[in-house]
Amino acid sequence: MRDVKRVILLIESSRAYGRSLLRGIVKYSKLKGGWSFYNEPRGQEQSLPRFSSWEVDGAIVRLNESEKAYRFLEKGIPIIVAREEKEISGVPNIVGDNVAVGKMAGEYLLDKGFKRFGYCGFNSSWSEARLKSFVETIENAGGKISVYEPPKSQRSCSWPNELLRISRWLEDLPKPVAIMACNDDRGRHVIEACKIANVKIPYEAVVLGVDNDELFCELSDPPLSSIARDTEAAGFEAAAMLDKLMSGHKTKCNRIMIQPTHVVARLSSDILAIEDPDVAKALSFIQYNSRQNTQVSAVAEAVAMSRRNLHRRFMKTIGRTVHDEIKRARVDRVVQMLLETDMTVSQIAYALGWSSEKHIAREFKAIKGVTPLVFRKRHTRLTVA
């Protein structure tokens, strides 16, 4: 028996989704040891016939057709499928929690004070799932939403023509408007269409994508805000599951869920659509100072207003107290540091001016429902059982 397990990776690596999956898989293999990879960087399914001559132990692939996945099963090769569309039965699937994505997008844009919203997606099941959740979140809060209808057949509408279609849709939207794009590609499409329609970002429209492909988001002008997902953690978990399958163990779990973690804000959403200018100024002050323990009195002083009057205006405009908004902003900063740094909770507490780890845990749990440690573990999962 070979000590080295041979694993096929049919995962395109040109975008952040595929690269993040691969990073998670590689991290597991380095911790566990003894894996050799055959990687097709373009994720080409045409490479499949060549694998019959390579003694394969397992595979993690992105496939469009279930029949090709079943070829592995027929050869007795354990396989895990990463697929945004309908899941393939009989094999473990890596799937996105599209309901959570739509909900996070809606809540983020609602918190910016917008009343009018738009959604721009593709003709796909995952885009429709994100749309449904986004609409539900917006309508439950009393917002109004317009949905871009993409052409039924991409062959019947060239990209230049669709760009014009999106720009006309944007022209007709009441302003200001907050737009969720189904992913970062669509987010860039919307931003380019805004230029044609002479819609100014972020003053007349803010745009939010999904996947946080940093290169593509920064290539956008202005840079695109985006929802980050724990794709790397899902890749790690998929490798751990494949390891068990290759060792002959059964698995009860047939789904690895990619969860959204947080919004990475860039210039495309860098504005607050608050009708009360003093409240908008106060919110900006709170966000800017979220790294320190800001007092309500400091916020009131920054906008030259009494605490009582500021409290009344906050409740009327956003339905929350100034103190509650300060705590929300600080907890959002903790989330960012938990997911984007290796700092311990104690170090984060010290950096952000909390008196103790117990204090930060109490306030974090009150808003997020779990402690910082549980939150980080849930959204990283990079440990070998």
Image (cartoon, rainbow, N blue to C red):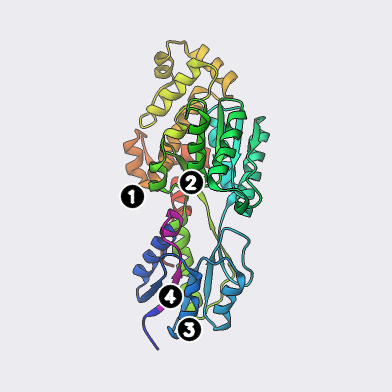
Mark 2 and mark 3 residues within 8 Å of each other at the beta carbon: no
Mark 3 or 1: in front is: 3
* Image location of residue 91, percent across then percent down: 59, 71
Mark 4 and mark 1 residues within 8 Å of each other at the beta carbon: no
Give the secondary structure at mark 1: loop
Quarter of the image containing the N terminus? bottom left
Mark 3 and mark 4 residues within 8 Å of each other at the beta carbon: no
Mark 4 and mark 2 residues within 8 Å of each other at the beta carbon: no
Residue 299 quadrant: top left
Magenta range:
6-19
- Please give the residue where the numbered disc 1 appears in the rendered image: 342
- Please give the residue where the numbered disc 3 appears in the rendered image: 52
- Please give the residue where the numbered disc 2 appears in the rendered image: 184
Q: How crowded is the residue under tag 1: few (<14 C-alpha within 10 Å), some, or many (20+)?
A: few
For residue 124, the mark is: none
- Asked whether residue 370 is in view, the answer is no
Q: How crowded is the residue under tag 2: few (<14 C-alpha within 10 Å), some, or many (20+)?
A: many
Q: CA distance from mark 3 to mark 4?
A: 13 Å
* Image location of residue 235, percent across then percent down: 45, 62
Residue 143 vertical position relative to residue 240 in the rendered view, above or below: above
Residue type at numbered disc 4: Val
* Image location of residue 79, percent across then percent down: 52, 73
Residue type at numbered disc 2: Asp
Sooner in the amino-acid sequence: mark 4 or mark 1: 4
Sooner in the amino-acid sequence: mark 1 or mark 2: 2
- Please give the residue where the numbered disc 4 appears in the rendered image: 7
Residue 105 quadrant: top right
Sooner in the amino-acid sequence: mark 3 or mark 1: 3
Q: CA distance from mark 4 to mark 2?
A: 30 Å
